[in-house]
Image (tube, coloured by chain):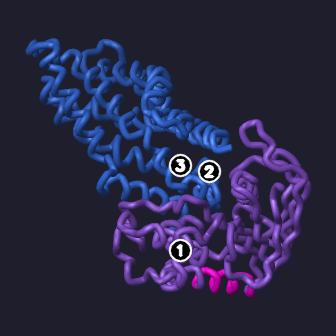
Chain colours: A purple, B blue
Amino acid sequence: MQLSADNLTCVRGGRTVFAGLGFALTGGEALVVTGRNGAGKSSLLRMLAGLVRIAGGRIALEGGEAEATLTEQAHYLGHHDALKPSLSVRENLDFWTAFLGGTGQNAESALDAVGLAPLAGLPAGYLSAGQRRRLSIARLVAVKRPVWLLDEPTSALDTPSQARLAALMRGHLAGGGMIVTAAHGPIGLDAPRELRLGP
Amino acid sequence: MSAFTALVARDMRLAVRVGGGALMGALFFLIVVVMMPFAIGPDLNLLARIGPAILWLGALLASLLALDRLFATDYEDGSLDLLMMGPLPLEAAVAAKAIAHWLTTCLPLVIISPVLGLMLNVELRAMGIVALTLLAGTPALTFIGLIGAALSVALRRGGLLLAVLVLPLTIPVLIFGVAAANAAIVGPAPFGPPFTILCALSLASLVLGPVAAAAALRHGLE
């Protein structure tokens, strides 16, 4: 499986954010996107997720499911947690699992994996920022998709949770998955490839 | 559970939970209809004659009430991004949200409309007919409103713009809804033609609404 981007150009609000960007990533590899604020890290991830129009160049995923697009084979973890405060932890996760095409048993083990199983019945509105983050990470575990697009996934996470996330990411890579992540600091992966945006 | 039913179930659950607003539409409908006799005066014959029109107008305004938050909340908390990334085409996801909105906001209006008809001195048979026309016409209101909700998703004060965008488009629904109700109650025109056109309006917006709303959302996010 290979994810490749070729000569990508991103234009937001009439301003060219980056141009001529390219990379290729094979199964089991992680790519860390670094750069200053506004260099286009989030835009690149949203572009890979199919949420921002590609102004130029191309993105291709080879060797995945032939029928599905990259968007349908990718998980996107953005700045927002996509949680409803009036639904319980379990209901939030169950919904995304069902909507993204997973099953109920996975949701249970995913809650365990992020350490939120004891809070399953609590409305998500009572969670702390870090717990909300963990709940959205549980979505990545509950539904299997080969590409993870993570936008500063460690923000708001405490040290044990960061270690837990790193373990989940290593597990995903060991299973042949791919990760593209924006980060400002170390994220706990051994020797990931790096893509630096901007000067 | 399929993605479609999961989304319908989630939106219905959100609507009936705290801060949802499922009952807001019905309460607003109630207050609008209650105010009317105070404004118009206690002329029972006049109230009975314009009762169906008042019920229709009240239902139209009430159905718009919760519509502006239909996509706005999902946009603000990032859910909309994920809805676009699911295996479900965006058109179907949008339709699922509209169905949930109709079931939680418009269906209660249809159900309470006979009770409110009592306050307007509308006779029993006429109340059944008004409820029937509302049942046939409110899907058109929801699915036309869907387009306005998608267009105004990223705007802070989207609610006002939504009303300005959507209300003119609902004029045909209002005309044929009231025409069908009046035809059945006072005559002499037949009930069939306006009611059939009302059903046609609902069916057409059922098809066009999700397509237009999905296109508006895709355009708006980029």
Q: Distance between the residues labelled 2 and 3?
A: 14 Å
Report the residue at 60% width, 55% height from top.
Answer: B81
Q: Which of marks 2 and 3 is nearer the N terminus?
A: 3
Helix, strand or loop at mark 1: loop
Subunit that carries the residue with mark 1 = A
Report the residue at 73% width, 57% height from top.
Answer: A36
Say which amino acid is labelled 1. Answer: Leu
Q: Give the range drawn in magenta.
A: A164-174
Is residue A94 among what the camera can see? no
- Residue A39 x %, y %: 75, 53
Helix, strand or loop at mark 2: helix
Give the side of residue B157 with respect to residue A177, left or right.
left
Tell if the residue under mark 3 belongs to the same chain as the one under mark 1: no
Q: Distance between the residues labelled 3 and 1?
A: 24 Å
Name the mark on residue B75.
Answer: 3
Say which amino acid is labelled 2. Answer: Leu
Is A169 located above or below residue B112 in the figure? below
Subunit that carries the residue with mark 2 = B
- Residue B28 x %, y %: 25, 34
Confirm or deny contact between disc 3 and disc 1 (CB under 8 A). no
Assign the C terminus of chain A to one quadrant of the image: bottom right
Corner quadrant of residue B68: top left
